[in-house]
Structures are given as structure tokens and as C-alpha cells.
Image: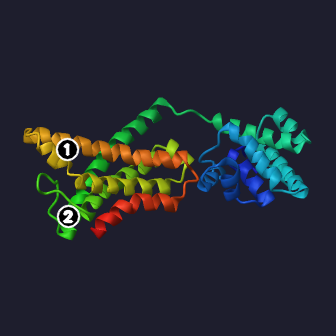
């Protein structure tokens, strides 16, 4: 069999296969991360910071018996011999008898090998930048088309809004949602086609991030159009063009900043109750429906 490179994901899969403990246990009780991130580690789509390695070793020691650790080392040694690696490093790793030292060394080497992968070239960086610009424009265009389609389907007459023609209640919520969905969709396309990883997606479940992001844009739309902000701005007697510019800028800022803050909260508190967060976010929608 042709040798392959020593990979972080390969080493981690051997650990889980050998001791039988679940990735969820590692995520919740040892490294304080979402369990989906552990699966991304195993697929080589992401890797932990080096300060988490001792916690992974402690997870193995506390969730395995001696026989399982012996089997783990035997399987890992076979893997080390089958991959492309410096001969001296191979001999040092395999010759280590202290299991704690052996495992931490294996994890550090695996992490170092991942960090030593080829860097992104200037041409690749340019491609990613162009993709980002193109997809940003497509997201804006798609949002407008989607909103107009929904107006047609539901018989709404809001379209581009304006004085006396703004959405209210659930329609304002839907307007916000239509702004968020294309952003998430085209962001994912950009990341996939550019073969890059977002810091957000590398640390958390992107599905939850996407749902919460778009849900928040809907809530922002609902609150903004229920706030009477247009009436407040119109009270200044400004020219129509300047007045609309102010309203659009404020709305756009809210749609950009508030969903981002929600995502950052998810990242900062990985154990946050998702049901509690969902209730807090959807409360304004429920109140609007009741009223």
C-alpha cells in the first residue's frame, strides 16, 4: 500500500476506535467545544489549538482501560509505520513506553504535520477574494429577487417599501429572513469553492450558525419596522433622497451587526442552551403574531 501523510484526523480516528468513547464526551466534558467540531477534526477539516492536547490525553486516560490503551498503541504504531514520516521520529515515537508521553507526542506530531501543509498562494488568495466579491453581489441580487417573488406569491404590495408602504408583523420578519438566507448560502459556496475555512465554521456547527443568523435577520426586520424609526426620521423634514438613505443605512447596519453578535455569542458560549437561545430569539415573533 502506498504511504500517506501522517494526519491529525487519522490519529484521532484511531483513538476513538480503540477506546470506544464518544466524540460527544470529549467535546462536552474535556475540550468545551461543540461535538460537530470533533467530527470535523476526524475528517481533517479542522484541528484544535495545541493547549487542548493535554485535555485529549486526559480524556483517553480517564475513558479507557489498560488493554484498550495497549491496543491503541499497537494500532497507532502500525499507522505510524504506514505513513510518510521521518525515520528518526518514527523510531522515537514507537520506542516510547510511557503511554502518556507517547500519546501527547503523537498528537503534537500530527498537529505539526497539519500546520506544515502548503500555504495558500497569491493566486489562490486572489481567487478567493474575487469569489467573495462576486458572491456578495449575487447575495444582494438574490435577496431582492426572493423578496419580490414572495410579494407576488402572497399578494403583498410592499416590494421596495417606502413611506406608507412598509411591511409589518410577520411580513417584516420575512423581509429580514430574505436578506439573511442568501448571505449564508453564498458564504458557504464561497468557502467551498475557495477551499478555505471560516473561523466561525471551524469552531462551531455551521448549520446552527446559519439558522440562528437568518432567524436573527428576520427578528431585526420585525423590530426595525415596528419601532417607528421611519416616522422619527421623517419628522426632521429632510429631503426624500437623504431621508431614505439614512433609513437604508441604519437598517443595513442592524442587519449586519446584530446577527454577527448572535454568532459571536454562540462561539463564546459553546454550551449555551440552544432551546433557550431559540426561545429568546423567537419571542419577538411570537408577540407580533399574538398582537
Side of 223 relative to 74 (left or right):
left
What x and y, as percent, mark residue 223? 29, 54
- The residue nearer to you, when weighing 45 against 124, is 45
The crowding category of the residue bearing disc 1, from other C-alpha atoms within 10 Å (few below 14, some 14 to 19, many at least 20), is some
Q: Is residue 60 above or below residue 48?
A: below
Q: Is residue 220 above or below residue 105?
A: below
Residue on which disc 2 sits: 151
Q: Is residue 167 above or below residue 155?
A: above
Colour pattern:
rainbow
The residue tagged with tag 1: helix, strand or loop?
Answer: helix
In space, the residues marked 2 and 1 are separated at their CA atoms by: 21 Å
Residue on which disc 1 sits: 247
What x and y, as percent, mark residue 235? 11, 43
Which is more foreground, mark 2 or mark 1?
Answer: 1
What x and y, as percent, mark residue 93? 85, 39
The crowding category of the residue bearing disc 2, from other C-alpha atoms within 10 Å (few below 14, some 14 to 19, many at least 20), is some
Q: Quadrant of residue 151?
A: bottom left
- Closer to the chain start, of discs 2 and 1, is 2
The quadrant the C terminus occupies is: bottom left
Amino acid at each position: 500500500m502506498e504511504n500517506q501523510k501522517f494526519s491529525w484526523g487519522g490519529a484521532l480516528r484511531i483513538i476513538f476506535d480503540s477506546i470506544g468513547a464518544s466524540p460527544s464526551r470529549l467535546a462536552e466534558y474535556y475540550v468545551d467545544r461543540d461535538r460537530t467540531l470533533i467530527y470535523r477534526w476526524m475528517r481533517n477539516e479542522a484541528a484544535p489549538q495545541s493547549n487542548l492536547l493535554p485535555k485529549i490525553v486526559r480524556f483517553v486516560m480517564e475513558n479507557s482501560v489498560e488493554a484498550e490503551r495497549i491496543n491503541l498503541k499497537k494500532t497507532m504504531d502500525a499507522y505510524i509505520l504506514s505513513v510518510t514520516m521521518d525515520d528518526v521520529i518514527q523510531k522515537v515515537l514507537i520506542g516510547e513506553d510511557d503511554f502518556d508521553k507517547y500519546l501527547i507526542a503523537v498528537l503534537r506530531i500530527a498537529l505539526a504535520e497539519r500546520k506544515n501543509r502548503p500555504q495558500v498562494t497569491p493566486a489562490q488568495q486572489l481567487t478567493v477574494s474575487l469569489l467573495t466579491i462576486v458572491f456578495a453581489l449575487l447575495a444582494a441580487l438574490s435577496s431582492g429577487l426572493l423578496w419580490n417573488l414572495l410579494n407576488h406569491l402572497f399578494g403583498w404590495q410592499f416590494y421596495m417599501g417606502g413611506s406608507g408602504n412598509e411591511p409589518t408583523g410577520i411580513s417584516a420578519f420575512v423581509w429580514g429572513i430574505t436578506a439573511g438566507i442568501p448571505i449564508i448560502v453564498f458564504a458557504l459556496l464561497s468557502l467551498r469553492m475557495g477551499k478555505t475555512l471560516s473561523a466561525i465554521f471551524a469552531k462551531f456547527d455551521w448549520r446552527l450558525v446559519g439558522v440562528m443568523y437568518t432567524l436573527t435577520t428576520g427578528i431585526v426586520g420585525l423590530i426595525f419596522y415596528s419601532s417607528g424609526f421611519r416616522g422619527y426620521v421623517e419628522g426632521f423634514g429632510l429631503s426624500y433622497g437623504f431621508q431614505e438613505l439614512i433609513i437604508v443605512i441604519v437598517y443595513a447596519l442592524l442587519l449586519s451587526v446584530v446577527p454577527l453578535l448572535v454568532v459571536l455569542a454562540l462561539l463564546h458560549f459553546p454550551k449555551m442552551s440552544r432551546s433557550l437561545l431559540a426561545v429568546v430569539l423567537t419571542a419577538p415573533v411570537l408577540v407580533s403574531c399574538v398582537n
